[in-house]
Amino acid sequence: MEQKPIGGYFEWEFPFQRKLSIHSNAVLLNSGRHALEYILRGLGDISKLYIPYFTCDVIIQPLKRLNISYIYYRINEDLEIESDIQLSDGEYILYTNYYGIKDAYVKHIAEKYGNKIIIDNAQALFCSEYAVHQFYSPRKFMGMPDGGMVVSNVDGFEDSLQIDKSYDRCSHLLKRHELIPSEGYLDFKENSHKIVDSPLSRMSNISRMILHSVDMEFIKQRRLANFNQLHYALKHHNKLSPLLGHNNLVYSVPLVYPFWTENDELKQHLIQNNVFVATYWPNVFEWTKETDLEYQIAKHVVCIPIDQRYGEKDINRIINLIDL
């Protein structure tokens, strides 16, 4: 047995909490897409997966690797499955918890489809666990070089996987502390591509330490406060307002504040004023027609940051930039 080295230079230290405050029994892997692959491999008998048109194209990667056929389905204006799907043996459904605001619906379809549904909670880190297959992507909620989480009853093979190494994927995290975001963005993209090219693995030790060190309750409360502040100011101008409610009972913790506006110049206006908003997901423009609801959502919904780095003054600045 190799002896533990003593002495030498110091590593990056984190205040390690022994038990995670959320999903404490989850399988920790190196990305959300690999978490989906873990579930698919564990199911074994899957022959077809129903996936929404409105989702990220990385979902397709593990399906192709495992030679699993898939068929698209549509969502309605409530961001829910448009038509009832009848499943045969070996068929499953993948549903995305959009923007982290569909927790109540996740509970409903978990009860309806049971073990035949896979919930993509990449945008809903705090969504409750149900007796279905769920996966999460903590990298979308905090600074981590890699990371995915699986909550499922599939036959596990975690111990057979290697531990990922992420020391060469941390440059964007370090630059984010000392430079403006645009100066580290290329590093962010390059490091994300490295994860795509890496095999299904266990979460790296660096990411595991980060995940165990963050204050989850602070993340939760700050995100909810920012979300509610934005909704109070924008709800009368947001086409998605009926989905967002006015209290914390509709969802646990959203990823962003989704603002459906007909002002197609707003995204660029915010970016030009150093408020960086993402488009989820550009591949939808290729998969659908301009008249399709999914296309319209991808085009018109502005995903406003609400994360824990920001407070009331920052949110007010965003609101003031939006010309109502």
Image (cartoon, rainbow, N blue to C red):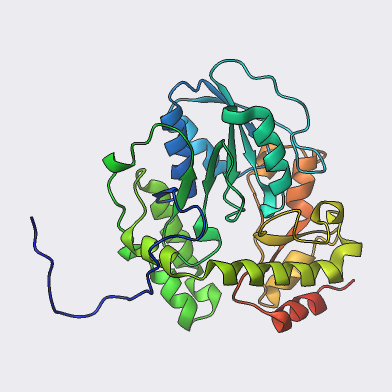
What residue is rendered at 80% in x and 41% in y?
293
**Image side of residue 68 versus residue 77, left or right:** left
Q: How many marks?
A: 0
Query: Toward the viewer: 302 or 90?
Result: 90
Q: Is residue 52 visible?
A: no
Which quadrant holds residue 322?
bottom right
Is residue 85 depicted above or below 198 in this figure? above
**Image side of residue 305 versus residue 249, left or right:** left
What residue is rendered at 44% in x and 71% in y?
173
User: Residue 29, percent across and down?
Assistant: 40, 49
Is residue 116 depicted above or below 275 in this figure? above
User: Residue 34, percent across and down?
Assistant: 44, 43
- Image quarter of the N terminus: bottom left
Query: Toward the viewer: 265 or 324?
Result: 324
Is residue 253 depicted above or below 183 in this figure? above
Q: Is residue 323 visible?
A: yes
